[in-house]
């Protein structure tokens, strides 16, 4: 009989790109968008967490499988099978979306830090930018990400708050499984943001490229040859992806419930600052002295930890996409002197994102607008991923089956419909 500790260790060894991507998905942009959703509409959009789960699992599994089977990132696969116009359009979308997201996340880190220390916003944004670049360029990302995943546990503040506050369970259960739709711009704007911060362009490119990194680390891939993987590798890939997405969507559901209960039901319907967002977890510490400060501390740790995890994923996925498109050496497994172009893109994207914070945009509002932009940018990329994952010539025996293919196309249609509805209601005033 096998030692149970050995089994547990083997199970946790499966954790990889899927779990990291799931944790990075609840970045500051996600937390801000879900908090705004709960504050504005109460439990009215809670059903989106359940509705998005199969869509999220299907699209991220398809991206992971594309990377694992081909041994290349998404940009390389698009380049090999489509014309350059399609490639450049796809890369442009992810680079622009990621750069805006980086800027919003850096601003959120500074705003969260200001809840704890009275330091100038500009100094904080510069400090976080330098810290992130130094860690990403000069530290092994595997070591870095393993440390930061522990910081992602600060998301547990929301499930813990969930079980402390008094809430109407029948209403919550009903809102979780019965869709509620309002035909106005504000509703579809936030819906597009929820979809965009959950099903984001950077996640597509990142997870595909990280599966390739995993294969390189385990010596499953040789230059110019397809990866030497089998059914076990694909099963572990799917399990890793499934666990990561379940964790991500449970966090999403918890944040919306907490924000709806603590903020919306107390008349706070518009979250405009980090302090507003931090109020959502005050019930967690309200029996302690200095509960206001403790809630800000927990919130700030969560935002900073997830931001430090998410921003390298954003800049890294942009670097993978551009490097693959223009045949530059790429990979976080490479040292700086062997991949100047790759790390140069990371640096430039991060600094451009930093500059966005100096044009007078509210950091918390910028996070929600970023999520909406991601929701629109995802649509054409989902179309390409659906085509590639189903292509027998590219994927061989591991091409998408009918179920995966159907759900990926449903994801495309849902994202398209949300974006169209948002623009339509905007045009109608």
Image (cartoon, helix red, strand yellow):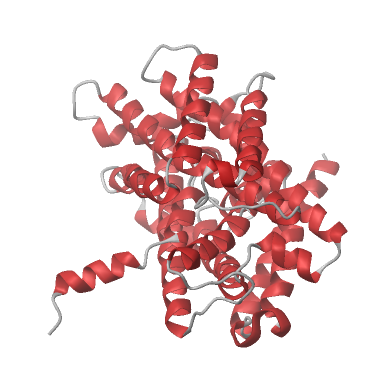
Quarter of the rendering occupied by the N terminus: bottom left
> Is residue 240 left or right of 341 when viewed as pictured?
left
Q: Name the residue located 29 percent from the left edge and 42 percent from the top edge.
A: 165
Q: Where is residue 36 shown, x and y percent of the image?
A: 54, 38
Above or below for 316 versus 78: above
Q: How many marks?
A: 0
Q: Is residue 163 left or right of residue 328?
A: left
Residue in the picture at 39% in, 43% down? 258
Q: Is residue 401 visible?
A: yes
- Looking at the picture, how far across and down is residue 300, in whole percent? 39, 30
User: Which quadrant of the view contains residue 383?
Assistant: bottom right
Foreground residue among 29 and 346: 346
Image: 376 above or below 10 = above
Query: Relative to 261, is 157 on the left or the right?
Result: left
Residue drawn at (32%, 33%), measured in percent from left and top? 298
**Residue at 55% across / 41% down in the picture?**
336
Does residue 224 appear left or right of residue 29 in this picture? Answer: right
Q: Does any portion of residue 376 appear in the rendered image? A: no
Q: Position of residue 195 (x, y in %)?
A: 61, 53
Direction bottom: furthest residue: 397
Residue extending farthest front: 337
The quadrant in which the C terminus is found is top right
Image quadrant where residue 294 sits:
top left
- Nearest to the observer: residue 163 or residue 112: 112
Q: Position of residue 324 (x, y in %)?
A: 69, 56
């Amino acid at each position: 009989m096998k030692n149970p500790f050995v089994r547990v260790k083997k199970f946790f060894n499966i954790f990889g790109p899927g779990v990291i991507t799931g944790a990075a998905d609840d970045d500051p942009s996600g937390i801000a968008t879900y908090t705004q959703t709960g504050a504005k509409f109460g439990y009215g959009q809670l059903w989106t967490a359940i509705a998005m789960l199969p869509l999220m699992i299907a699209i991220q599994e398809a991206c992971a499988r594309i990377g694992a089977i081909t041994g290349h990132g998404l940009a390389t696969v698009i380049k090999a099978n489509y014309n350059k116009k399609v490639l450049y359009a796809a890369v442009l979308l992810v680079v622009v979306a990621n750069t805006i997201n980086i800027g919003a996340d850096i601003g959120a880190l500074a705003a969260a830090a200001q809840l704890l220390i009275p330091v100038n916003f500009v100094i904080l944004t510069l400090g976080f930018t330098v810290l992130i670049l130094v860690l990403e360029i000069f530290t092994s990302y595997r070591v870095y990400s393993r440390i930061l995943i522990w910081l992602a546990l600060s998301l547990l503040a929301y499930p813990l708050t969930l079980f402390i506050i008094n809430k109407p369970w029948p209403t919550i259960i009903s809102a979780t499984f019965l869709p509620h739709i309002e035909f106005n711009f504000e509703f579809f704007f936030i819906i597009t943001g929820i979809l965009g911060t959950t099903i984001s362009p950077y996640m597509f490119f990142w997870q595909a490229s990280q599966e390739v990194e995993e294969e390189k680390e385990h010596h499953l891939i040789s230059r110019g040859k397809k990866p030497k993987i089998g059914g076990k590798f694909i099963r572990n890939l799917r399990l890793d992806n499934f666990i990561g997405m379940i964790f991500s969507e449970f966090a999403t559901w918890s944040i919306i419930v907490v924000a709806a209960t603590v903020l919306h039901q107390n008349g706070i319907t518009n979250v405009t600052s980090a302090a507003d967002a931090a109020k959502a977890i005050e019930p967690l510490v309200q029996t302690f002295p200095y509960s206001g400060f403790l809630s800000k501390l927990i919130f700030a740790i969560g935002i900073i930890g997830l931001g430090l995890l998410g921003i390298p994923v954003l800049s890294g996925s942009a670097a993978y996409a551009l490097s693959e498109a223009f045949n530059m050496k790429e990979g976080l497994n490479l040292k700086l002197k062997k991949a100047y172009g790759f790390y140069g893109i990371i640096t430039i994207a991060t600094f451009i994102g930093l500059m966005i914070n100096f044009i007078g945009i509210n950091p918390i509002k910028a996070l929600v607008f970023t999520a909406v932009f991601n929701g629109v940018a995802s649509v054409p990329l989902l179309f390409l991923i659906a085509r590639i994952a189903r292509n027998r010539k590219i994927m061989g025996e591991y091409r998408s089956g009918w179920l995966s293919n159907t759900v990926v196309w449903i994801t495309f249609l849902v994202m398209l419909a949300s974006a169209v509805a948002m623009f339509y209601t905007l045009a109608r005033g």
